[in-house]
Image (tube, coloured by chain):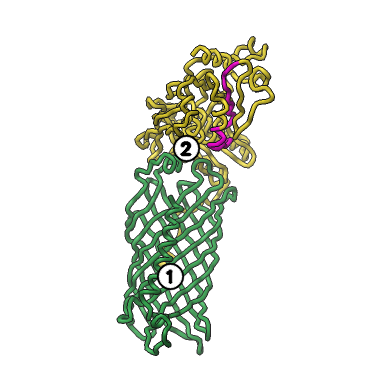
Chain colours: A yellow, B green
Amino acid sequence: MLFSLSACQMSVSTPSNLNSYPTNFNALWTIMDQHYCFFTTKHINWDSIKTVYQNRLSTMDTLNDVTFFNLCANMLNELKDGHVNLTSSFNLSRYWAWFQDYPDNFSSTILFNNRYLGNNYRIAGGFDYNVIPNTNVGYIYYPDFTYGFSATNLSYVIASLTNCKGLIIDVRNNSGGTLTYATDIAARFTKQTVKYGYISHKTGPGHDDFSTPEAEYITPYSTVPVVDNWVQKPVVVLTNRLCYSATNEFVSMMKELPNVTIIGDQTGGGGGLPMSSELPNGWTVRYSACPMFDANMNPIEFGITPDIHVNMTASDMAKGIDTIIQTAIQFIQQH
Amino acid sequence: MWRGYLLGSILFMMTSWQGMSQDTPNAITSSAWTLGYGQIHLLDEYLSPLVYSGSIFRADYQSMHYISLQTTHVSLDWTLMASIGMEHNPAATNSIFYCALQPGVGIHYHFRPVPHLKILVGGVWDVYFANKYSFANGNNPYSADLSTRLNASAIAQYNWHIGKLPIVLRYAVTMPMVGLMFVPQYGESYYEMFTLGHMQHTIHVTTLTNYLAMDNAITADFVLKRWTIRAAFYHDYDKHNANSLHFETMQSVFSIGAVVNFAVFDHGKRKAPSNYHDINR
């Protein structure tokens, strides 16, 4: 009996020195080495990065939690991935060059002036919507895929714009959130099941240990008349570089629908579903874990190219005009 | 899906209890309920590479009765374990909420090698369903241990006394031999599994090579005039591997409760005979 009880002990133990910098450095490097999904896609030599930063760690003049955090953050930023973050109790590391190095292509001041949304627009479940003044074009602004909505919210929004000639869905500056919201919206614009992409995941710690990519589909919400209208009429999705993660996936799926046109700037990317882990000292690390692809098996990590590329011009902005919305209005009126 | 499984398990237990009462009206049934508090350590590599530790509350139910009046050698046993707890990482920066349910049914053969000592050997079929929720994780906040196992089981029971106080000492050990378990793929999100329905390679056959577990229970039943009080120590260990992921759980719990022996003779129409079979002897 005593033998039985003593044999049943945990075989894995926690490192004795939780705050040792080498221990935590190795833990961070190993977590990324075994779980990050874009080493091969991005041609990253993670072993050589370890050598470089391990040398820096061993030769640092001042080593404390803040300098160690900065060292780890710099190592993670070598991945050039907006889904990679290190979180401590005093800071959050991030890589934001995927939008900071590009034009904004968005101005909330212009969007909310009387030319577009104005003051009397409606709000339903995270959607700001209205008919653009002096046009017959419906406009929906969805700023964040973490803003929840119900099927009823969406039905009311679409029904209220049903007499418009076309519809603009503006997801600029939307940096992502819940993936299922993306399919919920896209499901309103098709009467048929449409394959929009693939998703895969790691099956082991090797850099190329991946499952066979599985297809993802948009399933039609229903066949009520409102949906029929938006299958026939033009729909434009507006994008900029801040469209990331779930928004990037949304743009990828909308691009597969025949009556949908993407207008604006290239999206920011973020085509790896992120997951989380942690270091012995309690810092958490987020990383891209499951690569996602478009319908032609191209990775969407680097963004989606619009059908019509348009930047906001300084001269238009000075006049309170959003060049990208104006392009979308013209496109709808010509079709 | 797991809700349906849980509901099914509970309904199964309830209907089985009714069947037991109706099919064996003349057998003594010994039932025990205990409540306890203890420690749990868990490692779930799907959630974290670190061992989490914390406290746990646990409830156990056990019942045993002979299969028929014609035998005092073969018994049918029902068990149910439920536990709930909160565990923390070593740096105390994150927590995992844990709750588990483990119903089981088994058959034992009773050997009596010497007076006062009984050795029971048999098998138990059970379902183990543990839910773990990590508060810090994004797209991998939840992990489930779900398995069904055929276990080898052995019980040693010794009737002892301190002065005039009868005491029944008992040691029980259960070890899974073969079964089925659910394990997510190494880097697969629950979004892929349960929203998109991509469930390939998540169900595995368990053997001693990939699933090592042992449930130990030491109990002492103090037979008082009107009550039988049970003091128990449970030590459960579970280790399994699949899809390059490693899972481990160890819990040690001290419990206290009551044992009730009851019987229904001819559906309550006449008094109890003097020669009924007592499962405790």
The residue under the point 43% across, 66% down is: B14
Q: Between B8 and B40, which is closer to the camera in this rendering?
A: B8
Residue bounds of the magenta highlight:
A135-155
Residue B25 occupies quadrant: bottom left
Do labels 2 and 1 touch, CB within 8 Å? no
Nearer-N-terminus badge (2/1):
1
Q: Secondary structure at mark 2?
A: helix
Q: Position of residue B266 (x, y in %)?
A: 38, 82
Q: Which residue is mark 2?
A: A32
Identify the subunit bearing mark 1.
Answer: A
Amino acid type indicated by mark 1: Leu
Q: Position of residue B267 (x, y in %)?
A: 41, 80
Total marks placed: 2
| Residue A41 painted magenta | no
Q: Is residue B79 above or below residue B158?
A: above
Q: Position of residue B159 (x, y in %)?
A: 43, 83
Q: Position of residue A117 (x, y in %)?
A: 64, 22
Q: Between A143 and A222, which is closer to the camera in this rendering?
A: A222
Q: How far is the residue under mark 2 from the one under mark 1? A: 41 Å
Is A79 positioned to the left or the right of B123 in the image?
A: right
Q: Which residue is mark 1?
A: A2
